[in-house]
Image (spheres, rainbow, N blue to C red):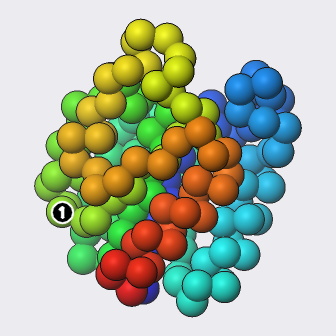
Amino acid sequence: MKLLILNGPNLNMLGVREPEIYGSDSYAELCRRVTEHAERRGADIEIFQSNHEGELVDQIQAAYGKADGIVINPAAYTHTSVAILDALKAVGIPTVEVHLSDVTKREDFRQVSYVRLYAEKTVMGKGIEGYLEAMDYLVEKYG
Ligand code: DQA
């Protein structure tokens, strides 16, 4: 099975960025753990990070007919992007939303998630482990 792992803005700054919220592991470490887990579960993955909304939309569109599942941490675009929601609806690929932090315990402006209106499942507050749980869900349901 093919999975697309998508990460939004500022996730490339993991380790440096507010470690008390997002942890001290780097983005490279996140990629390493996700790649290792994919190998364990027999999934083919593509990992992509962008600070630009349109590039995330492009990647979702490009996954049409190719990926069997999407794991997405849209980061700040979670709370603003109708374009990412529409792209996910357009391609119809089963999707799990992931957040490193538990956004329900944070600011009011983080309580809205557009992606959640499409995602089958949301995993939050579990750090990098949350990505692995999201992958397990997709592999077990669609693999
Ligand atoms: C985040 C939570 C978002 O509110 C924030 O804008 C991020 C990261 C998380 O992984 O906890 O950039 O998606």
Badge 1 local density, few (<14 within 10 Å), some, or many (20+)?
some
- Specify whether residue 59 is in view: no
List the residue tagged with mark 1.
92
**Mark 1: which amino acid?**
Gly
Q: Say which residue appears at 79% left-offset and 24% top-offset.
A: 20
Give above or below for 35 relative to 103.
below
How many numbered marks appear?
1
* Mark 1: secondary structure: loop
Give above or below for 100 relative to 67.
above
Q: Say which residue appears at 38% left-offset and 21% top-offset.
A: 111
Residue sitting at the far front: 105
Which residue is more in the foreground, 90 or 135? 135
Residue 93 location, x and y as percent?
Answer: 25, 65
Q: Say which residue appears at 53% left-offset and 21% top-offset.
A: 105
Residue 36 location, x and y as percent?
Answer: 72, 75
Q: Is residue 64 left or right of residue 79?
A: left
Residue 101 location, x and y as percent?
Answer: 60, 33
Which residue is more in the foreground, 128 or 28? 128
Give above or below for 84 relative to 79.
below
Location of the N terminus (image quadrant): bottom left
Q: Is residue 118 left or right of residue 102?
A: left
Quarter-of-image position of residue 125: top right
